[in-house]
Image (cartoon, rainbow, N blue to C red):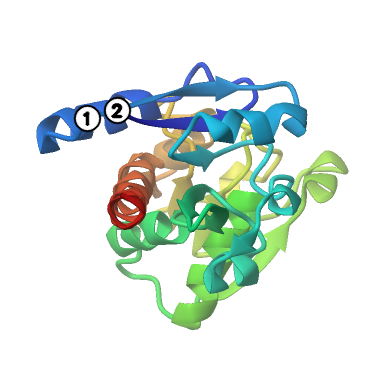
Amino acid sequence: MLRFGLVGRGISYSLSPQLHNEAFRREGIEAEYGLCDIPDLGSFGELMKGLDGANVTIPYKQEVIPFLDRLTQRASVIGAVNTIYKKDGLLIGDNTDCDGFMALFDEARDGISGEDKIAILGNGGAAKAVKYVLDNLCFRYDTVTHKEMDGGMVDISGYKMVINATPNHHPNVSYDGFSEGKCAIDLTYNPEETEFLREARIRGARVYNGMTMLVKQAEYARRLWKINNQTNQ
């Protein structure tokens, strides 16, 4: 039986095991997926000996890179990894978050043009995947760092879309900057509606959570595992 897992810290909320295990059953694949909640990456090498592939989440999407043998081109450009597969005995880091966010952005981009400004809250691994997609689509954006939000309320009134790529469900932004015709995206999917999305919704903005991104990035990760585990057999 193939074994996969989600490597992260404080991840009991994750729906990834349910998503992947249901997909494995549906596709008739003898595999299981579980949570690998570890306090640091000291045990990462030993952990991967027992896995045929993995996903990576907060806070290790960038920290895990030195522990890998190679990165795909897009993971190298993004500077973050959320999917690991094995090839010829090597650990390869890839990023399917960008596939997931592309699907989410396609749902949410109606009425957003290349002339509109987008704000990305946060600068971690998930935010880097978001920026990769927006760069490829030639959309303009500004990054709002944790330090800026910690230093005071950030004015978002000049942005047509605001993307929360932080784990903070209620980031310190000027929610009155939301209105009809604007859009809010939170990459969080649990809870279904964060305080960030609720505040935007009650002011008339269109809101989207991260469920589409979760489902799609998982789908693309399974494709990578399937291809490479067939190759390795």
The answer to which quarter of the image holds residue 135 is bottom right
Location of mark 1 (residue): 30
Q: Residue at x 64, y 46 (%)?
A: 61
Location of mark 2 (residue): 1
Left/right of residue 84 with respect to residue 212 in the rendered view: right
Q: Position of residue 130 (x, y in %)?
A: 53, 61
**Callout 2 touching callout 1 (CB < 8 Å):** yes
Q: Residue at x 50, y 35 (%)?
A: 199
Task: Look at label 1 and name its amino acid.
Answer: Glu
Q: Position of residue 44 (x, y in %)?
A: 67, 33
Q: CA distance from mark 2 to mark 1?
A: 5 Å
Is the residue 168 above or below the residue 177 in the image?
Answer: above
Residue 139, can we see it?
no
Helix, strand or loop at disc 1? loop
Q: 171 or 176, which is in the foreground? A: 171
Q: 96 or 70, which is in the foreground? A: 70
Helix, strand or loop at disc 2? loop
Q: Residue furthest front?
A: 233
Quadrant in which the N terminus appears: top left
Q: Earlier in the sequence, mark 2 or mark 1?
A: 2
Mark 1 is surrounded, within 10 Å at the Cα level, by few (under 14), some (14 to 19) or many (20 or more) other residues, namely few
Task: Look at label 2 and name its amino acid.
Answer: Met
